[in-house]
Amino acid sequence: MAAMTAALRILNEIFGYPAFRGQQAEVIAHVAGGGDALVLMPTGSGKSLCYQIPALLREGMAVVVSPLIALMHDQVAALAELGVRSAFLNSTLSGAEAAAVEARARRGELDLLYVAPERLMMGHCLALLAQCRLALIAIDEAHCVSQWGHDFRPEYLQLAVLNERFPGVPRVALTATADAQTRAEILERLGLGEARVFVSSFDRPNIRYRIVEKDDARRQVLDFIRAEHAGEAGIVYCLSRRKVDEVAAFLSSQGMTALPYHAGMDGEARRRHQERFQREDAVVMVATIAFGMGIDKPDVRFVAHLDLPKSVEGYYQETGRAGRDGLPADAWMAYGLQDVVQLRRMIDESQAGEAHKRIQAAKLDAMLGLCETAECRRVRLLGYFGEASAPCGNCDTCLDPPATFDGTEAAQQLISCVYRTGQRFGALHVIDVLRGEATAKVTSRGHEQLSTFGIGAVRSGREWRAIARQCIALGLLQVDHDAYGALKLTVESRAVLRGERRVSLRAWKEGRRIARSRAPREAMSPDNHSLFERLRAWRADAARSHGVPAYVIFHDATLAEIARTRPASLDALRGISGVGARKLDAYGADIVGLVVRHRAG
Ligand code: ADP
Ligand code: ZN
């Protein structure tokens, strides 16, 4: 276990952290001992250390394959701040710069080399690596080999070759995508049959999940950010490019720093926006899912969805970008029936084969089930990934449990109205008929003559929409794929109509209110808070002069602990999580000086 003593020393002295988290120690021991590994851990759990520490423990240089060119720069800068020798090779380097990196690698002057996959597979690069002593090969974002996922990268399929080219070099593949299918694909496609698989809990306890009924989405998200996250960084996801542009313009017009990001923008504008998001303190990125992988920012305080994601996997990955630093963060979503109709149509109109469409439809159903559940959201989410858990106390249904009622009669009314109108109309029309609204569409079809006309007048349109969504989520009705979102009966509908199946529904509640999660800065006393703000201002200067994002200098969590404990000496400062030897050298005197002056008033 000498290796583990050394590993712990590296963790304490270089990274400045007191203890390993979760399975880090086991993975590190296994890889440092020369074994292959597949590491499945949620975002923010500390996957990087699982290869960085073995890289320092083993002889030679570690190669890190990462698809995220934009990030390599920050990762290497962060390692430089810790005094670790690393570099990257990607298309942003000039010929001379790349040659200099290659020379350092050949001379054995690097502990870690980050390489983009397309670059790695070139003959030139493989030849370079053949001349170096390799400590290990890490394949980050390994789910990019999965052809079913939305992050598929064809270059990743070629990485299997590394096995033959560099036999005996341990390989570690890492991902935050948890489902069994992706896991199997990674093991197979990367030739990792012998690898030990490490699966962590996928829970992200600091994230508070909330799903609200969509009404005026732009206004709702504005209110949410204003009330709970003013001056903080966050991501707002929308389905279409057009909506991204609109929402970004709207939030900007309301005085926020909101930037759009989608695949329709030119590469330069996207790069600039991503960079501002990474580096500035309070940028709201409004984006399609094109903005995702590779957001390394630890202090994203909220992720908001203005449209229903297509799958629970996607939702979990997107919301997982919040709160990587472990401090309280929000995952907030507004969704409505129209989302379901729209996504069903997109699935149907896509060029994919029938088998693929069926998979997509099943994924959407699972997402819908999550939205409509009256149980703990986290129990549902983790259950989807095969993990059992108890109600969490940190989601909307736990914090404000929805009342349920016997909705059998309401469901029967809705289903029979769908049937009487010929299963050819969307929910809004069916609800008009139920409520006895003699709209032009209703009268032109003669639907005011139906026996179901007006039988549901006691309920509001909103209540009926909530009932319709739940009936769809429960499989009691389905949204027709090809008839403009018409509602149709299912086999289950008949059982309800015949009175053989009772239906429990969650009651629709006016203005559900959840206490806001406490932002890290609010949990502090005013005096600590003022020291915290001073430390942040100092950090902003330091980051600017080093040309790195602020969090690369110190995380908010580290500054908060300094503000709370007020270390008056370098020794006291050394004990704080996130303060390693190199940072103590570089910044210790500044910080202690600041604390001492603050104490003196
Ligand atoms: P992932 O790649 O799994 O999303 P990272 O490797 O970026 O996560 O780590 C997330 C954050 O947690 C980083 O800021 C990292 O420095 C911090 N971290 C990792 N391991 C530890 C640990 N043992 N103790 C404290 N902080 C840690
Ligand atoms: Zn819960």
Image (cartoon, rainbow, N blue to C red):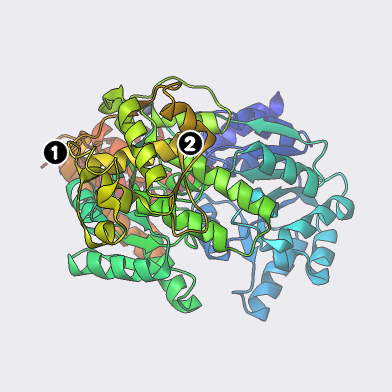
Mark 2: give few (<14), some (14-19) or many (20+) Cα within 10 Å: some
Q: Is mark 2 within 8 Å of ligand 2?
A: no
**Image quarter of residue 26:** top right
Foreground residue among 248 and 455: 455
Looking at the image, do the residues carrying marks 2 and 1 touch, with CB atoms under 8 Å apart? Answer: no
Closer to us: 23 or 329? 329
Q: Which quadrant is home to the N terminus? A: top right
Identify residue for label 1: 527
Q: Residue at x 43, y 57 (%)?
A: 342
Q: Amino acid at mark 1?
A: Asp
Residue 362 placement (x, y as % from top left): 57, 43
Nearest to viewer (mark 2 / mark 1): 2
**Does the numbered disc 1 mark a residue whose Cβ is under 8 Å from ligand 1?**
no
Q: What residue occupies the far left of the structure in this picture? A: 601
SS state under label 1: helix
| Residue 267, visible in the rendered structure | yes
Check the picture and name the quadrant holding the C terminus.
top left
Q: Quadrant of residue 320?
A: top left
User: Residue 98: x, y in percent?
Assistant: 67, 73
- The reply, left or right, for residue 573 in relation to residue 194 is left
Residue 213 image point, x, y percent: 28, 44
| Residue 569 position within the rendered picture, expressed as x and y whole percent measured from the top left | 31, 36
Callout 2: helix, strand or loop? Answer: loop
Q: Is residue 511 above or below residue 263?
A: above
Whichever of labels 2 and 1 marks the residue nearer the N terminus, that label is: 2
Residue 475's label in the rendered image is 2
